[in-house]
Image (cartoon, grey):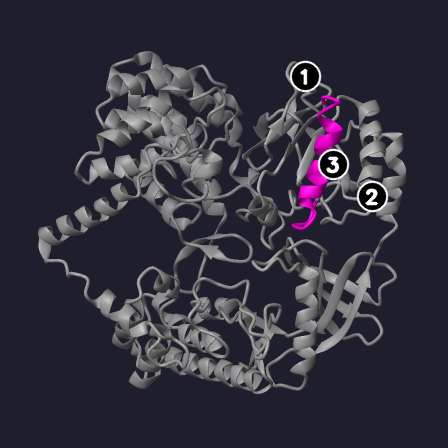
Amino acid sequence: MVMNPVGASVPQQGWKVHASACLDNADRILETVWAYCVPRRITFKFLAARTAVHLQNAKYAPRGSSGKFVTIYPTGIDELGTILQDLGALLTGEPGPYILSDLRWNEGPLYVRYGGFALRHCLSARGDRVPAIEDPNGALVPDRRDAVFCTPSWVTLPDLLVPQLAARNATTVTELPYRIEQVLHFSNGGGLYEATDQRTGARVVLKEARPHAGLAADGADAVERLHRERETLERLAGVEGVPAVHDHFALGEHHFLALEFIEGTPLNKVFAQRWPMNDPAAGPAEFAAYTEWALGMCAQVEEIITAVHGCGVIHGDLHLFNVIVREDGRATLIDYEVAARIDEARRPTLGSPAFAAPRDRTGFDIDRYSLACLRLALFLPLTAMIRLDTGKPEDFAEVIAEHFPVPPDFLAEAVRTITGTGGTSGTNGDALRRRARALPSLPDGINGWTAARDSIVAGILASATPKRTDRLFPGDIAQFSTGGLNIAHGAAGVLYALGVTRATPYPAGEHWLLERAAAAPRGTRLGFYDGLHGVAYVLAELGYRQSALDLIEFCLTEHSDQLGTDLSGGLAGVALNLAHFAGLAGEPSLFDHALRVADIVADRLGTVEGVGTISGGDHPYAGLMQGSSGPALMFLRLYEHTGDRGFLELSATALRQDLRRCLLRDDGSMRVNEGWRAMPYLDRGSAGIGMVLDEYLTHR
């Protein structure tokens, strides 16, 4: 919620003040900030609900915004100093999570950072549309919001903040007996590092916990969970397949646990490498060999869990990522931060949806449920669907038995445990299974398709909320950042699907989209999949041609040159849509606009060698939606419209850029190389590249 005094003038950028807060003192901090800022006509904003504060500090919340409860916008350096001095004194002693992107003011919950006040955008080096600030030359540059304090190169740190920077830099890791070798993982709760104990030369894993951050569902922060994990592992000392505790210590306000380093590979990666259904050439021998390995792996993990239970401990978070497979094939079970003693009656507060037990499972049955899911997931990794359809365990078992030589009892026991007919505390499994099996079956042929479509459509329309203004249908969480209108995540995509499948029309939904598209404010996203160009396309497909053309005219008045070059939300999709409407409306001027957009993309394209060999991370993505294959498709369509072979050459260059970021696997497939995994998918993977390449080759 933003509190902006009437007539107040706020700079577009500058030094801003953040106040962090815990769940139990957020109200008190807000009351203090309100009482200070409102009489002084100082603009500020705050998170308006306890749930929002919790989510902002949750374990997997973005680290760059973690802890930010209140933001205050000073009008200049003088007011900045006054606010920090006055409000800092009023809030002395109030705890709160450390804001990683900011510089802390003294020992309280106030932090400062230089950044944008007004929301402006520019393109990042990777081609993404990101928040921007203005440099001394008047150019918009990315407003970096990393999980580390930094200032733009042209900004001088105010004198009042120099001591704060010195205090921040005084805490280092140089005096620790551990040498950090590499980062293994970051979360909002802290980091996970591979390190060397300089006293012994032993390799260890350092697990970091930040106070008041990384909150679980029960409100426990990372420090509390780290202490629980240490107590659990000390209780399990000597159990085969459980990592040993080497040390625990604090550095500043952060707590650390030094654990035995397990040399090996996470089970999810081993599974992906071994699973024969990924290999089109795999035959009975390969399926039999895999089955033998998977049965052995399940037996090992079950043996570890049995030993853990023998010590009176529930692990609580068993899944593929938490099993490490050593080079010799032995399994180790890691990550005990949500583990609990059997006498604590405490449920896991974090977990994988594909393995987490339902609430009717208690005690050791929580782990038994996860073990049963592991039995199925190592053969068919779809157990996340069980929460949506309680009949799926039996379906999965049937598919597994059809393809793998698995003992029937192995699968039957897993199904009984998951459905609640074989555990000791599940009570409603039989009823759930009967209800799932009572669903009507679909007829064969076209009638089956029609019945399935009508059933799906009925569910979609039942979920519609036309009285809401932010979205029409429930969907991906991305619709709350990209908007509820677009094709990718909003109403336009759903209405388009209803239209092309010849489902019963939904006039109320179409009018909802028409009204909100016509009232779209300046600054609304413009892209084909994430913005108004896609909405215009769908409106035309639904028969609202004039409204679609009006929306295209509105898009042409916006600054599309600030977009990236991709197909999803960038210029490639815009140009393709303008070319489409030029033909639809017989408007050559729209095609001229498309050519001008294509010129911008061509200017930015660069050479084949101008892109690296890795996709994602700090590098531009490859693929159809966000990589060079989107521009390749745009150039290809323009070649088909104009016959200009220059467009065909540009398409070839763009395709070669994406192919440069692919690797050839042992099974003969080509996938996009992300450095740590190979992606076959449509959006950022090789499937989308292949689709465009196939069309390109028809012209060669």
Number of other residues with Cα within 10 Å of mark 2, as a class: few under 14, some 14 to 19, many 20 or more: few
- Secondary element at tag 1: loop
Horizontal side, residue 366 vs residue 17: left or right: left
Q: Residues within 10 Å of mark 1 (few under 14, many from 20)?
A: few
- Tell me where residue 675 appears, x and y as whole percent: 55, 55
Of residues 608 and 177, the one drawn nearer to the viewer in this rendering: 177
Q: What is the number of callouts on the image?
A: 3
Label 2 is placed on what type of residue?
Answer: Thr
Can you say whether 631 is above or below 253 in the image?
A: above
Name the quadrant containing residue 550: top left
Q: For mark 2, what is the residue?
A: 92
Residue where numbered disc 3 is placed: 32
Pick the front one: 311 or 122: 311
Answer whether labels 3 and 2 touch (C-beta < 8 Å).
no
CA gap between label 3 and label 2 equals 11 Å
User: The residue under label 3 is which amino acid type?
Assistant: Thr
- Say which residue label 1 marks: 8
Mark 3 or 2: in front is 3
| Boundaries of the magenta span | 21-41
